């Protein structure tokens, strides 16, 4: 079967070993085999995320965990940092769950800074803040360290972090940063199939959930906690994906988290230098993402046409997201992608553009 190699910011390529793990014989979700699987997976996720706290498995995409974080951690009012299509959408999720959601908004391509957050939180009485670590639509990664430092000045505010396109590709130390919910889907820097999401949930977040009404049912953190204590999930989870996650976490930890982060930084450097040489970067300087580069289409090339041609060579990249279509294009360098693959892709794009 012909396959276009994915250089899009999710889903990403899944290695054969992990595809094979999906096809392992199924086990019942209340069986001893499942409990052993759960008991293997969760500590490995803790190691990856730098947390001693809880890590829950969600049978949904990341959007489900956006909703879970809002429903469990916000009684009334939430501040939503908005800087692109995905961070903007988390605000919509908060509003549609009946919460009073305020906007802290910057132009697409710009970063949200610690100073902006400090000022906004000081001006209001918030239960929580939503921050997207790495805005996949614009290729901007916010500075987690300075944001985390400022969040320590606001201890009553739950720190909800979307690390959808940064987890397993950029450095995140959940406990050190004091993140209350840190969530991601597995089809991005984990290089696993779509269908499962994970999130760390702090003791503070669980304590908050105890006082919040209408947490919903499917993703009630307290129900998830109850089952977590038995190494289970409240309802039938995506068992094949958890088996693949088990295998991939071994590979990630064998590579080494630091080394994995370094590899992502190297790939990003190569792609960014190439983009600067031929076009320009869309991201504000100093905030370029290590997992996806958003290239400003300064030459007015036909992005869809380029992608069509790339498809004939069995590769695919992403057009700009929403209003950025044809104005930008995105090259993902996340997950298990290696340097030779990125160099090959960039050389192929150059060849196509020259002809
Ligand atoms: N957050 C970010 C940063 C994303 O990039 C995406 C999707 O690309 C999402 C959330 C939503 O993820 P999903 O569509 O898998 O629910």
Image (spheres, rainbow, N blue to C red):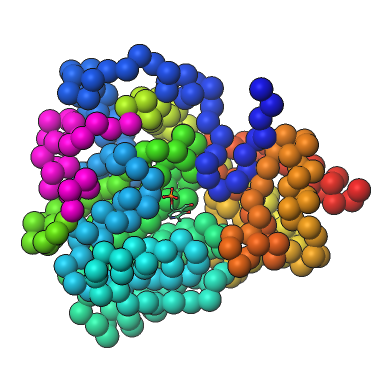
- Where in the figure is residue 173, as x and y percent of width and height? 34, 51
Image position of 122 (left or right of 104): left
Identify the residue at horizontal 28%, vertical 39% (top origin): 57
Residue at coordinates 21% horizontally, 35% vertically from top-left? Answer: 235
Magenta stretch mostly in which secondary structure?
A: loop
In the displayed orientation, state which residue is furthest to the top.
25
| In magenta segment, residue 33 | no
- Position of 127 compared to 311: left or right? left
**41 over 262 or under it: above or below:** above
Q: Quadrant of residue 49?
A: top left
Looking at the figure, which quarter contains the N terminus? Answer: top right
Picture quadrant of residue 342: top right
Segment tinted magenta in the rendering: 216-238
* Rendered location of residue 247, percent (x, y): 40, 25
Would residue 215 appear left or right of 86 to someone viewing this image? left
Residue nearest the observer in this picture, 67 or 253: 67
User: In this view, which residue lies farthest toward the right?
Assistant: 355
Asked if 125 appears above or below 169 in the picture, the reply is: below
Q: Position of residue 29 (x, y in %)?
A: 22, 25
């Amino acid at each position: 079967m012909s396959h276009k190699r994915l250089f899009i910011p999710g889903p990403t390529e899944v290695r054969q070993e992990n595809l094979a793990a999906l096809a392992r014989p199924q086990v019942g979700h209340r069986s001893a085999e499942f409990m052993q699987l759960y008991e293997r997976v969760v500590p490995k996720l803790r190691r990856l995320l730098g947390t001693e706290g809880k890590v829950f498995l969600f049978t949904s995409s990341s959007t489900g965990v956006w909703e879970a974080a809002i429903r469990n951690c916000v009684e009334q009012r939430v501040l939503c940092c908005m800087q692109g299509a995905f961070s903007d959408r988390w605000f919509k999720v908060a509003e549609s769950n009946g919460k009073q959601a305020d906007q802290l908004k910057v132009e697409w391509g710009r970063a949200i800074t610690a100073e902006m957050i400090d000022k906004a939180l000081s001006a209001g009485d918030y239960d929580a803040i939503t921050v997207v670590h790495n805005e996949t639509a614009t290729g901007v990664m916010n500075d987690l360290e300075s944001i985390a430092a400022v969040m320590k000045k606001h201890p009553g505010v739950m720190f909800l972090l979307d690390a959808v396109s940064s987890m397993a590709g950029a450095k995140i130390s959940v406990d050190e940063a004091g993140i209350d919910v840190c969530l991601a889907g597995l089809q991005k820097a984990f290089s696993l199939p779509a269908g499962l999401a994970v999130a760390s949930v702090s003791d503070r977040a669980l304590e908050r959930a105890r006082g919040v009404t209408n947490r919903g049912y499917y993703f009630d953190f307290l129900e998830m906690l109850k089952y977590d204590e038995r190494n289970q999930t409240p309802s039938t989870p995506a068992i094949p994906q958890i088996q693949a996650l088990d295998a991939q976490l071994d590979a990630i930890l064998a590579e080494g988290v630091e080394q994995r982060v370094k590899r992502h930084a190297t790939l990003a450097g190569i792609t960014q230098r190439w983009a600067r040489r031929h076009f320009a970067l869309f991201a504000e300087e100093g905030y370029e993402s290590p997992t996806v580069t958003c290239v400003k289409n300064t030459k007015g090339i036909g992005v869809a046409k380029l992608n069509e041609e790339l498809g004939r060579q069995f590769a695919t990249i992403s057009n700009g997201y929403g209003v950025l279509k044809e104005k930008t294009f995105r090259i993902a360098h996340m997950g298990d992608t290696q340097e030779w693959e990125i160099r090959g892709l960039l050389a192929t794009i150059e060849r196509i553009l020259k002809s």
